[in-house]
Image (cartoon, rainbow, N blue to C red):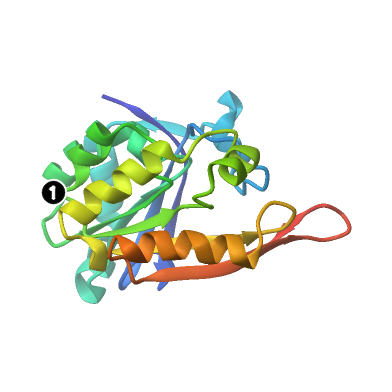
Amino acid sequence: MKAPLIAIARHRLTVDGDGVTTLVAFHGCPLRCAYCLNRQCWEEEGIWQWMTPEELVDELMKDNLYFLATGGGVCFGGGEPLLYSDFIERFAQLCPKEWHIYLESSLNVPAERLETVIPYVHYYYIDVKDLSPDIYQRYTGGTPALVQQNLHLLASRHLQEHVTIRLPLIANYNTAADRQRSQQQLEALGYTRFDCFEYYVDKRASLLR
């Protein structure tokens, strides 16, 4: 099996996992977020390289000493990495067991894709956006139904302490009160770790965080 990548970013520290991590970003996403930072994941010309799990393990062995020395590992992002859950499963079966596997996801995928990787993922960074169906649809073009289903799935496995949920304040889309309502719904499921930040748009309509 091969998967399309948009980038491999090495030597990341404290950004997406413990120790030194390498970000592997997949092409493809079910959402069309208004302020997307990785629009190349939508377009065919945005594909940088196709790789098999075996090829990716070989490529990331270059980082093995960093991972072992710092307790780091590989973060799968994108785009939406869970579109390639079988690839991630195979990679995790092949790579050294000392490598930690991190996942950055919107969780807007069928539950079976999340089920596939749960045995291998050390920690999750979930980009929830906003749980209001209206706000979510206007901002992403999609619905939060699958996101909520998958958050319930992780909670049912008692994995809340292995999850950081990102809740942005999104200019022109939600308010602080909207974000607070989303956080309260998530706290009711037992989630306690939140990354709350702000998206805003400057006069040139570029996105800043």
Q: Does 19 appear above or below 166?
A: below
For the C terminus, which image quadrant? Answer: bottom right
Residue 83 or 101: which is nearer the viewer? 83
Q: Residue at x 36, y 30 (%)?
A: 3
Q: Residues within 10 Å of mark 1 (few under 14, many from 20)?
A: few
In-image side of 112 versus 17 (left or right): left
Q: Position of residue 152 (x, y in %)?
A: 27, 49
The quadrant in which residue 147 appears is: top left
Q: Position of residue 120 (x, y in %)?
A: 16, 50
Q: Does 56 appear above or below 23?
A: above
Q: Is residue 6 visible?
A: yes
Task: Determine the residue located farthest toward the right in the rendered image.
Answer: 203
Q: Does 92 appear above or below 74?
A: above
The quadrant in which residue 73 appears is: bottom left
Q: Residue at x 43, y 46 (%)?
A: 106
Q: Position of residue 157 (x, y in %)?
A: 15, 54
Amino acid type of the residue that numbered disc 1 sits on in the rendered structure: Pro
Would you name the residue on which mark 1 appears? 119
Residue 69 or 109: which is nearer the viewer? 109
The quadrant in which residue 150 appears is: top left
Label 1 SS: loop
In-image side of 125 versus 157 (left or right): right
Q: Residue at x 73, y 61 (%)?
A: 200
Q: Does 178 appear above or below 116?
A: below
In-image side of 18 versus 94 (left or right): right
Residue 184 or 17: which is nearer the viewer? 184
Residue 146 or 120: which is nearer the viewer? 146
